[in-house]
Amino acid sequence: MKLKRLPSLLSLVAAILFSCQSKTTNESAMKPAENDVHSFAQPNDARVTHLHWRARVDFETKTIKAIASWTIETNPDTDIILLDTKGLNIEKITLDEDVPTTFRLAESDSLLGEALAVLIRPTTKKVNIHYQTSPEAEAIQWLSPQQTSGKQFPFLFTQSQAILARSWVPCQDSPGVRFTYNAEVIVPKDLLALMSASNPSSKNAEGVYHFEMKQPIPSYLLALSVGDFVFAPISDRSGVYAEPGVIDTAAWEFVDMEKMIAGAEVLYGAYPWERYDVLVLPPSFPFGGMENPRLTFATPTLLAGDRSLTSVIAHELAHSWSGNLVTNATWNDFWLNEGFTVYFETRIMEKLYGRDYAEMLASLNLHGLKEEVQSMLQDGHGADTRLKLNLKGRNPDEGVTEIAYIKGYYFLRSIEEQHGRGKFDAFVKDYFKQNAFQGMTTERFVPFIKDYYQKQFALSLDDAFFNKWIFSEGLPDDCPSPASVKFNEVDKVITNWKSTQELEYDVTKNWSTHEWLHFLKNLPAKLTLPQMASLDEAGGFTASGNAEIITVWGVLAIQHHYEKAYPKIETFLINTGRRKFLMPLYGEMIKTKEGKKRALSIYGKARPNYHYVATSSLDKLLEVKL
Ligand code: BES
Ligand code: ZN
């Protein structure tokens, strides 16, 4: 066991405790895990395999009091196990059936938290950690009744990805470490608890709920939500949980969920997690969706009323294979999770709604990717435009860019296009099958796909191709380009509008959200106020209930000082916590002095509604020091 990763100012006792450190032996039957710069754990010496979590959720004190009993596997000569924690108040730790032991928490690192070292014996099978979360636990958002749809009951949800699980469960918080879990969770009697596991479908009188996750998962997929939920089935194996006032809308919006699961299975193999349900959260949820196994967490901004934003559900569902089954071994390999998932998502959408629909999505994505690549290269962040990242000493959140998602997608698509879809589909299916429930690094992915194409199709894939896409900056010149007939029509309307200043109502009246998004993103860079006003009148953008449209339009409105949209932008920013919408709107506002003042004033009102994930990005953007 290497001690150098523990900060040096440990107490004397700890020094004695650690002086009998063991070396890693080669006799170990344990499979080696990747070195993860975002975790203190040393899973090659001692690792967790199962979690038994008993917890009581207290909305009064905003804390969870819990016992995390970890079943462990160790090398014979290892005498400590290292776990990740952040802000946990640890009361005591025992081994096996309550044998006392010694533990130490290392000095706090503002990003990674506090390493927890527990003294174990060669025969130790279980480590029982009695602890309480801090009211500021970064993964957990505690919502007042006012912040929910029903306004009657409090609400809680967790967001563990990437390295926040450690703020609510002491764990080996690395995507390369997997474990099964079961849990008993006690909540106020009028509320229901749900986890990323087998779930209840209704409340019980005791407020005590039991969960089981039989397949091994990494810690970033641990999830809990507590609130006033009801359930609506969509098929035998899927359904929606939401607050009572939202459930019908949600069940209508996501009606195609079973078709998505079935379509995904036809593409890349049987759905491996039994059930697939979606939980619609309150608007402060910082993401579009989060692929918690068996229970995707989703933002209510997907409920557009026209089913136009359901590709996010296809995306989270696709993660059931790409990510949850074959997992990026470290956050530097994040593109393996997201690039594959965008590829799979796009294929699901194509299967259900046709090629042109999928090409619209791919085209909107490419637009965003090009913008981001350009600004990253300009701002001196060129290294982050590589698929393989180096996030050492940085927050893995900084790797959440269009690169992992969309450059990753286009990389895979270009393999598909070069050698044919039949071959690529056979590869993807086998890639999931052969690496199921394991971590994958970029460095192992390259030989894996090369071997596969060689053995199956006698094709040798070129190293230069991989180097160009994975280890080089920017976007290769031969990046595939999507072709959408519908978007070609939109382009014609734009051309026509430029010369006549008229929008052809007969054409635009049938446009979907995607066509309008393409339209708004391809308008001339400079617009006059009368042009903004007439566009608004024709497209109804300021009045739109679609969060994607409001965001793109809002950015245009701020750029062009179109003040009529300002009140709408303000209410939207106060009521929505999804980072993807907040960042561009605030980001555009702060480009002028006047705008920055407005941004800060809105942020002052909105910040209490946002999750830590959003405030940590926005505090930086707006240079707010607390
Ligand atoms: N797993 C991600 C969300 C995430 C990434 C959380 C990194 C924390 C760290 C999720 O699957 C995702 O990608 N969500 C997207 C949706 C999407 C369709 C691109 C989102 O929230 O916008
Ligand atoms: Zn994703």
Image: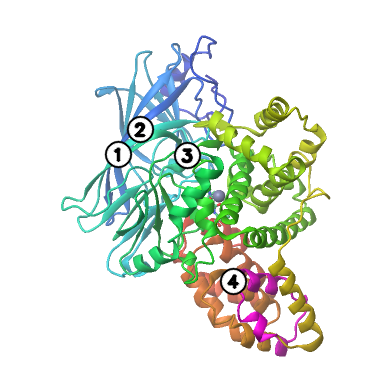
- The amino acid at mark 3 is Ala
Q: Position of residue 371 (x, y in %)?
A: 74, 60
Q: Nearer the viewer, residue 10 or 486?
A: 486
Q: Point out the stretch of residues depicted in magenta.
A: 504-531
Q: Determine the residue positioned at 55% across, 41% down.
A: 268
For marks 2 and 4 on the same chain, the one whose residue lies earlier in the sequence? 2
Confirm or deny contact between disc 4 and disc 1 (CB under 8 A). no
Secondary element under disc 2, as helix, strand or loop, is strand
* Viewer-nearest of discs 4 and 1: 4
Residue 513 circle label: 4
- The amino acid at mark 2 is Leu
- Which residue in the protein does label 2 denote? 51
- Which residue in the protein does label 3 denote? 270
Q: CA distance from mark 2 to mark 1?
A: 8 Å
Magenta segment includes 429: no
- Which residue in the protein does label 1 denote? 183
Q: CA distance from mark 3 to mark 4?
A: 32 Å
For marks 2 and 1 on the same chain, the one whose residue lies earlier in the sequence? 2
Q: Determine the residue positioned at 50% across, 51% down.
A: 316
Secondary element under disc 1, as helix, strand or loop, is strand
- The amino acid at mark 4 is Thr
Q: CA distance from mark 3 to mark 1?
A: 27 Å
Callout 1 crowding tier (Cα within 10 Å): few <14, some 14–19, many ≥20: some
Q: Determine the residue positioned at 54% across, 23% down.
A: 3
